[in-house]
Image (cartoon, helix red, strand yellow):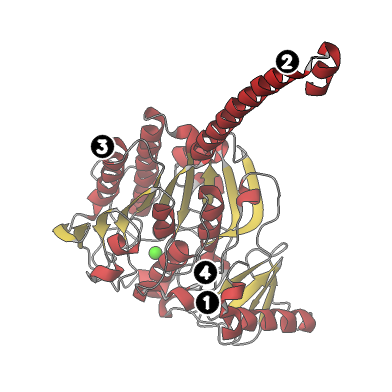
Amino acid sequence: MHVQMKEQIKPQPATLIFLNRCFLHRWMILKVLLVLVSATASAAEKPNILIIFTDDQGYGDVGCYGSALNKTPRLDQLAVEGTRFTSFYSQTVCGPSRSALLTGRHPIRSKGWGMPASEITFAEKLRDAGYQTACIGKWDVSNRKPIIERMPNAQGFEYYFGTLGANDGGGVTFHENNEKVGSTRDMGSLTTLYTNKAIDYLENRRDSGKPFVLYVAHTMMHTIIDASERFRGKSEGDLYGDVVEEFDYETGRLLDTVDELGLRENTLVIYTSDNGPWNQDKYTKKKKGHPEGSIFWGDAGPLRNGKGSPYEGGYRLPCIVRWPDKVPAGRTSDAIFATIDFMPTFAALAGFTPPADRYIDGINQTQLLLGKQESGRDQFYFQGAGIRLGKWKYLKPKAFFYGYAVEDDRQKVDELYDLENDIGETTNLALKHPQKVTELKELMISVEGSDRLRPADSRR
Ligand SMILES: [Ca+2]
């Protein structure tokens, strides 16, 4: 266009200088404008992040994951509005699940309940990248104690309200930031309480000029379970069903607040659970302290075993992600995706660099989330137990189980399953495919091995 203009006008030198000045002037204004627009765009592109994390909710407990018993209209709707992941992995038990989610590192490195102060969480990185950071609910990575340097404020969350440990004894103590602020034995009040705190954060506590990350980690449906008066006795799934349905309702209330505040379009919502359901007789039937007549019996759907086991029922959880016009709506993805991937994925979305001085097990799954690719992780490691590579899953003879999840008749041999054709891990193919067993065993050892902890590997 510029060349064309010169040819048409054929200006004299003085005019040419003048025109060039005009052009330069306009070009500079344009450049400044472009910089401003792109700065605004990149700020606008940084999404808010809302993580809704349940406790001990199983793969089969949610309507859109096949539950015929529990009514979960809000989570089902979220799946219509976002992508439903069917090969999503957390961990098999509470504390390790949280350290993995927060750090992007398997619990063999991030240490679970005893997560050291030296671990770096996505909240620390997001805060440094200009985010406001808040955690509401169950922390469970400071040995369930008020160890200040391992509590949320010291691990990147500028605001915290919740309980540092679990509720196995039927009571919890609350901390607001580092201060003890009360306790309760009314377990049926917790889902509403945390939701109210999360809503209060969105409405009153945050600075609307900055993006936020809000991590809401519910105590329900971890035993001792209970629902509020409004939901108790209302579901078809006994008290456990009541709790699932109350959680669904309260999650809907939080999502409504996101809408009312005009945050829907630029908020990445992630719903998932920390580990599979309690579903083994040897523990559930002996456990005391629940309201009369209730059994805390979650549903792993078609998956084998539940919480505490390295079978799919322990690790594979529902996960729904919504980000309007970014994450495809109504899509189901069987790509392998995991909580350890949150750190590198948030890094890509928010513009920070994951910690480079330590091994990060997670990978950046932005392309998967945005529907630009359909493949996810190639492998996923099961703590002290085995590894999945593509459709193949290997478990070693001495695979680690928490006591309550041990299958008494399990033979301690190499196990190999084809998850594409046998999601319930019913047919051991180890003898049929010895080379595959060798390959996966070597891969498992390489993930566990200290040679993979070099800083140079941390960006993988
Ligand atoms: Ca749990």
Q: Nearer the viewer, mark 1 or mark 3?
A: 3
Marks 4 and 3 in Cβ contact (< 8 Å): no
Q: Is 374 positioned to the left or the right of 36 in the image? A: right
**Badge 1 is on which residue?**
383
Q: Mark 3 or 2 closer to N-term?
A: 2
Q: Is mark 2 within 8 Å of ligand 1?
A: no
| Residue type of the residue flagged with mark 1 | Gln
What is the distance, in whole Å, between disc 4 and disc 3 at their CAs?
43 Å
Neighbours of disc 4 within 10 Å: few (<14), some (14-19), many (20+): many
What is the distance, in whole Å, between disc 1 and disc 3 at their CAs?
40 Å
Q: Residue 61 at what x, y percent from top left?
A: 47, 52
What is the distance, in whole Å, between disc 1 and disc 2 at their CAs?
75 Å
Q: Nearer the viewer, mark 3 or mark 2?
A: 2
Q: Which mark is residue 204?
A: 3
**Badge 2 is on which residue?**
15
Q: Nearer the viewer, mark 1 or mark 2?
A: 2
Q: Residue 187 at what x, y percent from top left?
A: 24, 55
Q: Residue at x 52, y 62 (%)?
A: 354
Q: Is residue 284 above or below residue 439?
A: above
Q: Nearer the viewer, residue 129 or 201?
A: 129
Q: Secondary structure at mark 4?
A: loop
Q: Mark 1 or 3 closer to N-term?
A: 3
Q: Is 443 positioned to the left or the right of 318 in the image? A: right
Q: Residue at x 38, y 40 (%)?
A: 210
Q: Residue 144 at what x, y percent from top left?
A: 27, 70
